[in-house]
Amino acid sequence: MKKYKVDEWVHYCPLPDVEYFKDVRERALILAVLTNDVFYDYRIYIEDSRKIKKVRESHLFSIPEPTY
C-alpha cells in the first residue's frame, strides 16, 4: 500500500541519505502511483524546476497541514 495519493502535494528530497542535503526539500505534486514499476513508486511534478520525475517513496515527505 502506497503512502501518498494522486494530486497530493508533498516535499521531494533528491538526496535524503546525504547529511548535507537531507534538509533540501522541493514542493512536488504526485501525478501517478506506479504500481507495476519494480524500482520507482511515484511519478511527480516538481514545482520550482517544472520537471517530471519518477521517484521512490523514501524521497518524499508529507507537508504538514496548516494551523489557522
Image (cartoon, rainbow, N blue to C red):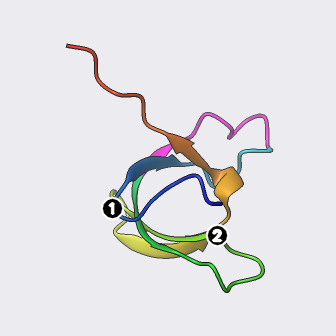
User: Of the numbered discs in the image, which one, if any, rests on residue 64?
Assistant: none
Which amino acid type corresponds to the residue marked 1 in the rendered image? Answer: Asp
Image coordinates for residue 47, horizontal then vertical, percent: 33, 59
**Badge 2 amino acid:** Asp
Secondary structure of the residue carrying numbered label 1? loop
53 within the magenta span:
no
Which residue corresponds to the image point at 37% horizontal and 54% vertical from the top-left? Answer: 8
Bounds of the magenta segment: 18-27
Q: Residue at x 66, y 57 (%)?
A: 57
In the image, is residue 63 above or below residue 38? Answer: above
How far apart marks 2 and 1 lie (CA) works out to 15 Å
Residue located 65% across and 60% down the image: 1
Name the residue that disc number 2 marks.
41
Residue 28 is situated, as x and y percent measured from the top left of the image, at 41, 56
SS at circle 2: loop
Residue 23: quadrant of the picture: top right
Q: Residues within 10 Å of mark 2 (few under 14, many from 20)?
A: many
Most foreground residue, 51 or 54: 54
- Toward the viewer: 5 or 18? 5
Marks 2/1 in contact by CB < 8 Å: the verdict is: no
Within 10 Å of disc 1 (Cα), the crowding (few <14, some 14-19, many 20+) is: few
The disc at residue 7 is: 1
Magenta segment, principal secondary structure? loop
Q: Is residue 63 above or below residue 46?
A: above
Which residue is at the far top? Answer: 68
Of residues 38 and 17, the one nearer the viewer is 38
Quarter that holds the C terminus: top left
Residue 17 location (% of width, % of height): 80, 44
Residue 64 image-quadrant placement:
top left
